[in-house]
Image (spheres, rainbow, N blue to C red):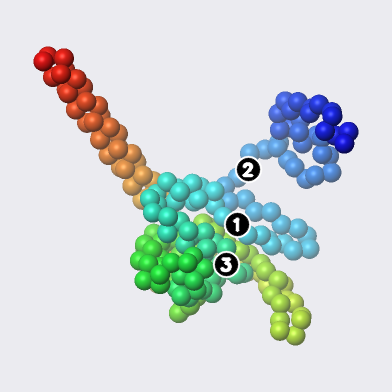
């Protein structure tokens, strides 16, 4: 009960906060690099990564909810190496949407090089956008196996295949350009509405 009666200590900045918890591994001394990964000596590169830039761009680009929900499901459904063992029926069941709505949303995502189809029922996230490097696979007999797939190996495999350039060398630039165009269109419509509103007021005042 004494905790509720004491005043909270003011926080000046994040470094001040970090110093209050010296046992926690928190470094604010340098700027985090894009797509930086963290691992341990016991399990090197045992990470699941999602590009923050990628999430920011798709949040602005997709105006409908289903493509975004589908992307989040695909991120969560990855196994080691970025493989996604989900059929479109599985996706529809998890998202609670009709099967026929999943296909066009998935095709749109694939057209941007975000996800590619490996074989029926198995897709893969493009490694620069989201990637799972390792997992602990449990066997039916109770045993477990640590499986690791280096991100560079996955990239090399993609670039060696006969795939579209957008998949082999992905870029979010097309989405950024589409976002800029949409914002320009909206700004033009707002100006048009203001001009119409101003003209209406002038006519009413003239009367």
How far, Cα to Cα, is label 2 from label 3? Answer: 24 Å
Q: Earlier in the sequence, mark 2 or mark 1?
A: 2
- Residue 49's disc is 1
Outermost residue on the top side: it is 206
Residue 78 image point, x, y percent: 57, 67
Quick check: can you spot residue 91?
no
Quick check: can you spot residue 199?
yes
Q: Are marks 2 and 3 in contact (CB under 8 Å)?
A: no
> For the point 73% across and 40% down, which residue is it?
27
| Relative depth, front residue between 164 and 119 | 119
Mark 2 or 1, closer to the camera: 1
Q: Earlier in the sequence, mark 1 or mark 3?
A: 1
How far, Cα to Cα, is label 2 from label 1? Answer: 14 Å
| Residue 182 placement, left or right of 200 | right
Residue behind mark 2:
32
Residue 191 image point, x, y percent: 25, 29
Outermost residue on the left side: it is 207
Residue behind mark 3:
78
In the image, is residue 96 above or below residue 173? below
| Residue 23 placement, left or right of 199 | right
Residue 203 image point, x, y percent: 13, 19
How far, Cα to Cα, is label 1 from label 3? Answer: 11 Å
> For the point 65% across and 54% down, which residue is it?
37
> For the point 78% across and 45% down, which residue is it?
25
| Relative depth, front residue between 110 and 126 | 110
Mark 2 or 3, closer to the camera: 3
Residue 174 image point, x, y percent: 36, 50
Residue 205 sits in which quadrant?
A: top left
Q: Earlier in the sequence, mark 2 or mark 3?
A: 2
């Amino acid at each position: 009960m004494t905790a509720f009666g004491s005043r909270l200590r003011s926080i000046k900045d994040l470094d001040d906060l970090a110093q209050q918890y010296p046992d926690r591994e928190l470094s604010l001394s340098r700027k985090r690099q894009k797509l930086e990964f963290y691992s341990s000596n016991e399990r090197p590169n045992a990470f699941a990564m999602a590009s923050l830039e990628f999430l920011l761009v798709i949040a602005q680009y997709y105006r409908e909810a289903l493509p975004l929900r589908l992307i989040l499901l695909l991120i969560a459904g990855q196994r080691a190496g970025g493989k996604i063992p989900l059929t479109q029926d599985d996706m529809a069941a998890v998202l609670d949407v009709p099967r026929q709505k999943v296909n066009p949303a998935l095709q749109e995502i694939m057209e941007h090089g975000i996800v590619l189809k490996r074989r029926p029922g198995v897709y893969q996230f493009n490694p620069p956008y989201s990637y799972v490097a390792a997992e602990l696979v449990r066997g039916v007999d109770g045993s477990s196996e640590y499986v690791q797939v280096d991100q560079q190996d996955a990239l090399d495999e993609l670039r060696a295949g006969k795939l579209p350039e957008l998949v082999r060398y992905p870029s979010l630039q097309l989405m950024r350009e589409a976002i800029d165009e949409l914002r320009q269109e909206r700004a033009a419509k707002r100006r048009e509405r203001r001009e119409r509103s101003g003209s209406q007021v002038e006519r009413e005042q003239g009367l």
